[in-house]
Structure formats: structure tokens, C-alpha cells
Image: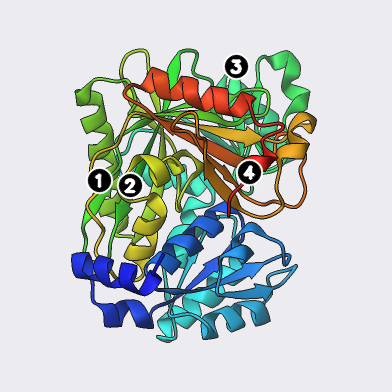
Amino acid sequence: MNHNADAQRRALAGGSVSTINKARIGIIGCGQLGLYLCDAAAKLGLHTCIVAESADSPAGFKADQVILAPLIDSDTIEELIEASDVISFEKEDIPNHVLQQLAAAQRQGRVKVHPDPETLFMLKDKGLQKTWLQQNGFPTLPGQFTCGPADAQRRAHQCGFPLVQKLRCGGYDGRGVQIINSAEQIDQLWLEPSVLEPKLESFTELAVIGMRDQHGTISCYPAMAMDFDHELNTLKQVLAPANIPDSLTERAEATVNRVLDAMQEVGVFAFEFFLTAEDELIINEISPRVHNSGHLTMDACTVSQYEQHIRAVAGLPLAPLGSLRPSAMVNILYENRIDEACPYRPVSYLRSEDSAAVHWYGKSTGRFGRKMGHITATADSISAAAWQASRALEGLPGKSGEYAA
């Protein structure tokens, strides 16, 4: 692909070439989300610099510059600031001292940071996030906040059983979330600061990927239905668009618009909703970044969540979304039987027998349940797309000969 020609074409659609050529994007995080952010930036002619724990991190294969740092310290962040015009994130679990350093550099006019460090500080803490949502009138489940061992059991009894416990900070990919079904299991409570919520018995989980650019334009991908592996507590499948009435889709998108308008933030934000049996939409949580549920936008849409995020933080207008084809995305979760199929560099290929696109992240090591890649299929119907994605997933072992760069 001619990246310069591609950048010029996209610039004419919503931004100047001079703006594009000047922007240097710093990204804290080096996993698959960073990989696809760097890929999107390259197609727009932008320079990327990432902070990575190891040289073989997925994003390192696409970034223009890699700062190797097993631990993120002040010198590492200073180097990233010097290498960047704008800094963003592929994860929210950023140490507070890093956010403070970035906030100071932004106040000094040395770099722009999206989302703002103060917003990220609030959203990465599930307790602070829930408090902000409730104070601003957005629908959430009632919750009890625990501060430590002294009040964990008391708060659990106040919440009632069964309940869901979420660590306030640091949980992802199934970590930091557990269900306590009855008072007899109360000794299983984690003693770290947590949010306790009543467990819903009948609900659908939806995702809406929303975005806002620096010009104040807000846009949303249509609502998607999420299916979780409840043993691993991790996302297993996404179907899009969700099979819900248009009125519910409009309500979800309206809520996303109101939240983004209230935050006045820039970039892509992933909203997870509970849809109850009574058609009530409740915000489960907001991730201030591109998200696993939005992987399918790479293949099912005219513009991906990754390009939209890069455009927003770089000061370019959001691109028109176009239509979303019926699609399904399944995560490739590590298990021993697929070990032979896992390449140790990022690769993507289209299966010759159907529309399924297989994307490997190039992770160097696998552990049970780890996300090693994903598969997206598009079709004339959601059910057909889901069948194709499932068939491609089951056919992974022995497919190594089909890899393409």
C-alpha cells in the first residue's frame, strides 16, 4: 500500500496533509490494541512511539519507535513526551504518578494528552466512575464501595446476595471480577477496595463504541451484543448489529452521546450496557480507549475504531462511519490444542472458503484463556456470520500454511 497516497486521500476527506505529517502519536501500552492503533496511524501517515515491556510486544511490530521499559518510571515518560505531540493510551491501568507527570507536561504546553489524565484517573477506578455517572444522572446499578477488610463483609450484607464483586482498579480480561452467590461464601470476598453490585438474573450485555473529536463531533457504531465465557469471565463473541429494537439502539446511542458531551473528552470510548428483561439500559462500565468488542470494525465497517481514535487525538475530524455489515467476532483464547497455530508475529489472512478474517496478535507466550487473536466474519445475516466465525475458530489447528504477512 502507498501510505503517502493513502494519507493524502484521507486528508482530503477530513484534514490537511501538513497536519498529518507533523503529528507524532505516543501510546502507552503495547498489546493488540496498540498494534492496531499503530497500524491505523501508519495508514494516515502518522509517526508512532510506544512504551513496551519487551521487544516482541505486538505493537512493537508496527510502531515507528519503541521505548523499552519493564517498569514505567519518570524517565521513560519524559522520553515519550519528547518523542510525541500527543499521547494516548491502549489501557486504563496507568499508575497515578504517570498521570500526574503527563498532566504537568500538558499544563506546560509540551504535549497534548487524550483522554485527559484527570478523566483517566476517574474512569480507571470503578468506584469513582460509578460515582461520577450517578452524580450526573446516568443509569447504573446501585453499589457498595469497600475500603478494605474492615468493612467488606458488612458492605456485602448491605448489598445482598448474590452479588458481583469488582476490584476498583486493575481488573481486566476476567481478572478482578467474581460472583458471591450467598452469605455462606462471604469468606471468599477479596479484601482489596472493591465495588459490590447486585447480580442481575436476566439480562443481555451490549457494547456501544462511541467517539468524540476535538471539534466536538460525536459518533457511535451501532450497538453490538456481547457473549461472555463465564468460566474465564472474558469476552467470547460479539454479534453486530445487536438484535434489538431500533428504539433501544437509539436510547443506547443517546446515552453515549450525553456521557461524551458531559465529559468533553477526545477519542474512542467503549460503553458496556446491561439490557434488562424490562428493557432498562444500565451502564455497566466505560473503558476510555479502543476495545475488544470493537475489533470487528476492522472488517465490517468502512472505518475502524482504531482509525477513528487516531484521527480524534491527532486533531482530525472523525471519518463517516458508513454502514455496518452483519458480522460476528470471536476471540481466539489460548489452549494447548491451538499452540501449533499461534504465530509469533502479527499476521492476518482471509480464509479462501468464506468471508472470515483471521487476525493473530503475535504474542510470544500463551497461557490458558489469553487472547491470542480474533476472527471476524461478515455475511448477509448475523446467524450466517456467527456460523462462519465459529467454523473458522474450530478449524485453527493445522492452518499455519495459510499465514500471510
Q: Point out residue 288 in the picture as x, y percentages from the top left corner.
A: 45, 53
Q: Circle 3 sits on which residue?
A: 161
Mark 3: amino acid = Phe
Numbered label attached to residue 171: 4
Q: Is residue 312 above or below residue 169?
A: below
Kindly identify which numbered label has been placed on residue 312.
none
Q: Nearer the viewer, residue 41 or 368?
A: 41
CA–CA distance in space, label 3 to label 1: 34 Å
Say if 393 sits above or below 99 in the image. Answer: above
- Looking at the rendering, in which quadrant would you find the N terminus? bottom left
Q: Mark 3: few, some, or many residues within 10 Å (few <14, many ≥20)? A: some
Q: Secondary structure at mark 4?
A: loop
Residue drawn where x is 78% and y is 25% of the image: 187
Gap in angstroms between the C-alphas marked 3 and 2:
33 Å
Name the spot of residue 97 as percent of width and height, x first. Answer: 61, 70
Q: Earlier in the sequence, mark 3 or mark 1?
A: 3
